[in-house]
Image (cartoon, coloured by chain):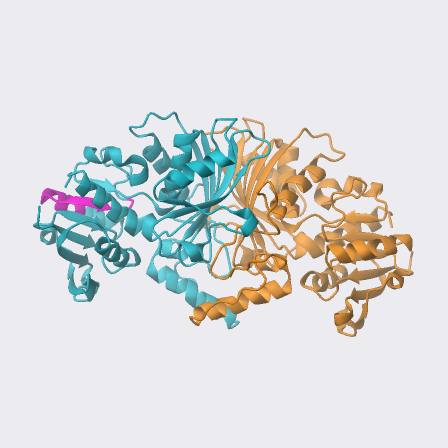
Chain colours: A cyan, B orange
Amino acid sequence: MSEGYTVAILGATGAVGTRMIQQLAASTIPVAKLKLLASQRSAGKTLTFKGQPVTVEEAKPESFDGVDIVLASAGGSVSKKFLPEAVKRGAVCVDNTSAFRMEPDVPLVVPEVNENVLPRHHGIIANPNCSTIMMMVALEPIRQAVGLKQIIVSTYQAASGAGQSALNELYSEAQDYLDHKDMQAEIFPTKGEPKHYPLAFNLLPQIDVLEDNYYSHEEWKMIHETKKIMLDDMDAPDIKVTATCVRVPVPISHGESIWIDTGDPDATVDELRAAIEAAPGVVLQDDPAHQVYPQPINATGKRETFVGRIRADLENPGAFNLWAVSDNLLKGAAWNTVQIAERLVAQKLV
Amino acid sequence: MSEGYTVAILGATGAVGTRMIQQLAASTIPVAKLKLLASQRSAGKTLTFKGQPVTVEEAKPESFDGVDIVLASAGGSVSKKFLPEAVKRGAVCVDNTSAFRMEPDVPLVVPEVNENVLPRHHGIIANPNCSTIMMMVALEPIRQAVGLKQIIVSTYQAASGAGQSALNELYSEAQDYLDHKDMQAEIFPTKGEPKHYPLAFNLLPQIDVLEDNYYSHEEWKMIHETKKIMLDDMDAPDIKVTATCVRVPVPISHGESIWIDTGDPDATVDELRAAIEAAPGVVLQDDPAHQVYPQPINATGKRETFVGRIRADLENPGAFNLWAVSDNLLKGAAWNTVQIAERLVAQKLV
């Protein structure tokens, strides 16, 4: 493959798809040919890759003939329809949707944590949920340095996690609010649900559908994906996880308030800071004396996850609070997907 | 006192002060005379109480001559200067600032939780911090019904908690952002601090100053005020508390994601729901099948604290997650202060 790979991006025109094009251009993957695939509605549009125009084509099974790598972010049903066709034609697919994440033979990968499971793939590798990925990047260095027994997380999730049209809705609601007009809610909390509420200047404690045990599906993902990523093929004991997911009126970059029990009553804030400083993909922003801590406006556009406000729980030795922020469209989606493809290439698995 | 009380509001022109006037007008307290006190800068302004104009006077020690009840919300240093003068002149003061909260002989009161400590006052009763009050109202029914051993809280706090000028800054920043202009940050995260960051479309994990153990003073208040309110003069065992406080771009009404360990492994969601439904000052908004849960836009202007999204921690029997929202300017400040005064009158303690 000395001349490079034929790469297809499925869902190329969305908030994540357009960022996949940018991240792929900035990656180490040698790209011989790029195919941009989308629905019929978007076919014919022209996007740019490394300065060259590329016309968007309608995705069909035969679109994947001759494709080596597929990066998919067009929704779960689209992935379910097309990725098996792509695999049949010899492609390796990195899927940013939730379609295959919990399938036992599909690796669910955050490269900083479990790149080692990539060789087990059968043509599809899943990208975890955005809020899960950043938590894994923040906590894996701590798990390795001092241990990890329990996670209690509350999320502060950005509007763009629900797509470009949702982000536009946040902006139009905000302008209506400032103009003393009624806000028009048609997307949040979740497009397919019967009721819609404004997100601008508000908080919505529902992301994805609410399930029979009262957890939202987003919360379910954080709990179960964490276990699959951290415990699969790793010499780790069980980790308890619970989550509360809240949408906040921020355009891009999620925040997470995370309480952990390391299980080591002698663990210190300095040890946690040192572990994070030494780890890949994560940046320590923790200087309380100079008001330095992670903020969405600073994290947006960056590939890293930022961690700060690390504090010992004053009454539970070995437990800590911390605050993490990461660009949900990059590390939470486009970059983690391209990064998995980079690691597949580096490991000669494609 | 059959003709009613002489009441003074100190800090009458602020976001909380103006709401104290409204809450007092709607209270059961018979008011014979109302004095509105503020700084020299605001003296001469005219505000309205029960349809009658009242002129704001500059606060001086002698302003408190003949005053029965003082409601104070003009900042800690103003309370420290004037409330001892008011007490000397025979007044009973309910203070919304943090000036006296942790003094051993000053009752710190949320009427739904510990009205019983009011008789111990020596002229000053303290109103707790806004984020503490709503958490106490939400958790006291659960503590009474099934127990409470540990609290881990992450807050989503509204801009108005930092005052009217801070709220104005959120709005002007939001308009600048929508107009693609640079945002001008002069107040957030905390007025007296050297660095300022935009709050609009952002998240700021600093409320009040950051202290030597890396906790913010707001987090310190939630931890220590909770213990004083729930454990003082109550037959309760110790309760562990830890907190992460985050400012969010919402004008009014705080949200809180609260994890609790009740200590009762047999406790159920239904028991918690029933306890909240039966308790005063708190409203259960928890119908996942119909997307019913607390939201700031619905809580604003109401006296109650709203609780929903109650879920059992799936791996820790007896532990639960819940989501609470309350108007930080009413139950978090003006209403709780006036409510304490109502209870003082009802208990004949003034």
Q: In the image, which residues are magenta?
A: A82-98
Identified at 19% across, 61% down, the residue is A50
**Closer to the camera, B182 or B116?**
B182
Residue B77: tell me if it is visible: yes
Q: Is residue A85 magenta?
A: yes
Identified at 58% across, 36% down, the residue is B151
Identified at 41% across, 31% down, the residue is A145
**Closer to the camera, B245 or B112?**
B245
Say above or below: B159 vs B221: below
Residue A260: tell me if it is visible: no
In x, y percent, where is residue B298?
56, 57
Identified at 36% across, 48% down, the residue is A304
Q: Is residue A167 left or right of residue B72?
A: left
Among the 4 quarters of the image, the one containing residue B13? bottom right
Q: How many marks?
A: 0
**Closer to the camera, A276 or A68?**
A276
Which quarter of the figure is the N terminus of chain B placed in? bottom right
Q: Is residue B162 magenta?
A: no
In x, y percent, where is residue A11?
23, 56
Q: Is residue B347 left or right of residue B328?
A: right
In x, y percent, where is residue A307?
44, 45
Q: Is residue A13 left or right of residue A209?
A: left
In x, y percent, where is residue A154?
48, 44
